[in-house]
Image (tube, coloured by chain):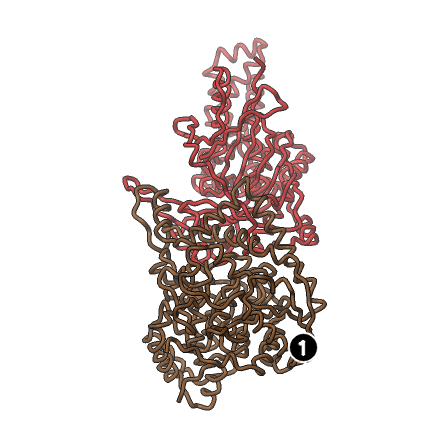
Amino acid sequence: MRELTPTIGLEVHVQLNTDSKIFCGCPTRFGAQPNSQVCPVCLGMPGVLPVLNRQVLLLGIRTALGLNCSVRDRAVFHRKNYFYPDLPKGYQISQYDLPLGSNGYVEAEGQRVRVHRVHMEEDAGKLVHKPGEQTSLVDLNRAGVPLLEIVSEPDLRDSARAYAYLKTLKGILQYLGVSDCDMEKGSLRCDANVSVSDDPQKLGTKVEIKNLNSFRAVARALDYEIARQREVIAGGGRVAQETRLWDDAAGVTRGMRSKEFAHDYRYFPEPDLPPVVVESAWVAEIRRTLPELPRQRAERLTALGLSEADAAALTAAQGTADYFEAALKASGKGAAAKPIANWILGDLAREVNARGAADVAALGFGPERLVELITLVDSGKISGKMAKELLVECLKSGISPKALVEKKGLSQVTDKSALTAAAEEVIREQAKAVEDYRGGKETTLMFLVGQLMRKTRGAASPAVAQELLKELLAR
Amino acid sequence: MKLPETIAGFQTAYRQKELTPREAVEGVLKRIEAVEPKVQALLWSDPQRLREAARQLEQGGGPTSATPLWGVPLLIKDNICVEGVPTTCASKILAGFKAPYDATVVARLKRAGALLVGMANMDEFAFGSSCEFSAVKPTRNPWDLQRVPGGSSGGSAAAVAARMIPGALGSDTGGSIRQPAAFCGVAGLKPTYGRVSRYGLVAFASSLDQIGPLTREVGDNARLLQVIAGQDPSDATSSDAPVPDYVKGMGRGIQGLRIGIPKEFFSEGLEAEVRTAVERAVEELKKAGAAVQPVCLPHTEYAIPTYYVLAPAEASSNLARFDGVRYGPRAAADSMEAMYLKSREAGFGPEAKRRIILGTFVLSSGYYDAYYGQALKARTLIKRDFDENWERVDALAVPTTPTAAFRLGEKLDDPLTMYLSDILTISVNLAGVPALSVPCGFTGKGLPIGLQLIAAPFAEETLFRIGGAYQERTDWHQKAAPCGN
């Protein structure tokens, strides 16, 4: 049997960060009291009409351009009809055969992933299920929050690439300033379509996976589902076309009753919204004012001498890249790009993870402090090891590195005379090593330096310690 | 004094201080008390609230140029939202529903100083041509209580004809203002699509619906349109075309106006008495100086099938929100799906169900192209028919309905025959053009006949000019319906 190749396509929904909803003036703030951000329009009261929020169109065009899509010259809306209590009008105003953007692409870690379409639509409300109760409550604060749906072509072959695509996409959307892309708040959601086939020219039966609440969940669900489909086929079975829900705790996908998704949405042109002409001059203006995107920024950073991997890692999230560039600027001719990058991608990244912070900028350790820290090391004031410990303390106390060094009297001992007593002690204690060194085994010197460092609890400058020991042993 | 029967009459009486709003309200209430038990035009009215509104109006001083309808009592069709007032579309599914906001037209009427007397009966959700599909009660024709007032704005037309109030608002999707206006012997205007804001009109078919006035006199019709017309930021389909001074325009007469007569509107099925009355009306217009010529609207025969695909399609979607979740009665059920089914089963009447099913069918996958797609194309052709005539003529003159008012129950069990009573009004909605029905005579049985005048988009002024000139030369509109007396 030939190898079964997976094919993956992703549908991403992002909430646009407009102040008001797509078809009414209600605020879009997350986490407000249920049903406090509603009006007759987004409640679907009898007689109300939608009016398009122009900011949504602007952000939609910006996104389409950022994803290299062509932008349609008319914004045309359709109604997608289905019944659900979180859908006040019984239809969702969306776009159908005439999406705002189409035929774009994203360069995701070395792979070009084509973007099939980008379209605008309104979000639905939320059902709140109270544990132990038979009834559900409806919160319509989210109803009418503007969404963009971004659909990729089935260009992805494995979960790692899907993950890379999502990360890249999120970076681009954040750079464009169109969404905060916070999956926890639901401002970015993802559904995956996956199939396996023994003929790379032909797609297998498509399974849609829903309930994916993190990029990691997407990757895990895809791995699980690809393995499951391979197993089904290996066992002589056929993959059923269906929608499956990812159970993150159990690490499995489960089929839904097919009836729940057997919809005929009866799309037809939304008669309440005449097509809006998208002026080409406006599109050109938006294109001209597009911000620098992650890939262009990474190219700029490689020109500074950073590796491609480091540049990509630094620029994936805008906050991190901004932090890097601010530090670079603050350092003037001082610290170079490389140590700044190392700190951000090393110790600071570790702290970000440990603290669950959004990014390095959220640590409360500004770029000027990082520059201070690097300058302390470069000037020999403190050792690299001390700097790492100092960083942790700075984050805890909120005190700047320089102030903390002064406060604690922490500074690298570079005065030989201050180290002489300790060095002589080491020579006395480590008679064997001293003998070896004098016998010509020069590598032993580093052991002795280590002992001296230990005795001074790291305060000694390693270079000075080495020089001093050499002098004393030569006597 | 005797209560004025026209808006202009009220305005004069107030100006000359012969009448106060409170006296007007008492007069209106008295008139309603006398005729409403027979006509059954109202779904809701609150005398105390009305008296209070009149008192407040008086406290605020007299009429100003900003309050052209100061103290004028008006009726609102039950599908136009009035804040705090039951707005039910004469449907059980909105029983107990009070609108949480004013429709734009209602806000404009209130600002203009009008007194809103109550809500007028209609066919449920405006589905019907006889007012018999009201879930509450059928309204009677004031000229013959055994006959229908027409529909769906039957309550509005009957109340004006019965002289309860000098004017009312209706809505017209396929003839729902003009057909009852013709049946009841009053003037009814379907404005250009986009001329009047639809915000707050409970949608039937969004691409066809327009709110318009029903009055006894054409001048009053112009006075009402003047207040409710104009762009509304809450309705993206409302037009920014300027609103001319309609009443002023009427003074210009119709000398030299070119009026087209499309033969397609005078085909078989047109009652002889109606034909004769309309032909005489056209002669009258000639005498007033109009130049009459034949014109052609070749796709007219497709109007009914086109309409009965497009309108139910939009209706099926527009009525999805009536689901028992947020407002209206909710049926007890043990699952979500059952709750939807039972609530809608109990809430919608037979004609609403028929149209929802029809509309759902024509939009469903596999049928969309054959029905909805084709109907959109036919609509374009029908619209083009009209467009091509506006270089040759200023207006068209045709009958409003093929027959006068029919008997209650006569067409109730035969939906197709009922649909055909709109055959002469529907293409106007599909084309989006304005049309005015004015009384132009009576049948041998004393039933009113309507002359329908149609003009180019946003040429309501032309319709008022012609209708006004016609009413200057005739007195059909001054005849009083007997209301069973």
In percent of width and height, residue B443 lies at: 50, 73
Screen quadrant of the N terminus of chain B: bottom left
Residue sticking out furthest to the left: A132
- The percent coordinates of residue A213 (x first, y second) are 45, 35
Q: Which residue is mark 1?
A: B290
Mark 1 crowdedness (10 Å alpha carbons): few <14, some 14-19, many ≥20: many
- Residue A303 to residue B439: above or below: above
Along the viewing direction, whichever of B208 and B53 lies nearer the viewer:
B208
Q: Nearer the viewer, residue A337 or A282?
A: A282
Q: Nearer the viewer, residue A269 or B465?
A: B465
The subunit letter for the residue under badge 1 reads B
Specify the farthest residue to the top: A439
Q: Colour of chain B?
A: brown
Q: x, y (%) of residue A278? A: 65, 53
- Secondary structure under the numbered disc 1 in the rendered image: loop
The chain letter corresponding to red is A
**Going by the picture, which residue comes out furthest to the right?**
B391
Between B190 and B256, the one nearer to me in the picture: B256
Can residue A25 be seen here? The reply is no
Please report the residue visible at 51 percent of the width from the left and 66 percent of the height from the top: B403
Quick check: can you spot residue A103?
yes
Residue at 65% over, 32% down: A112
What amino acid is labelled 1 in the image? Ala
A99 horizontally vs A93: left or right = right
Q: Is residue A425 left or right of residue B369?
A: left
Name the quadrant of the C terminus of chain B.
Answer: bottom left
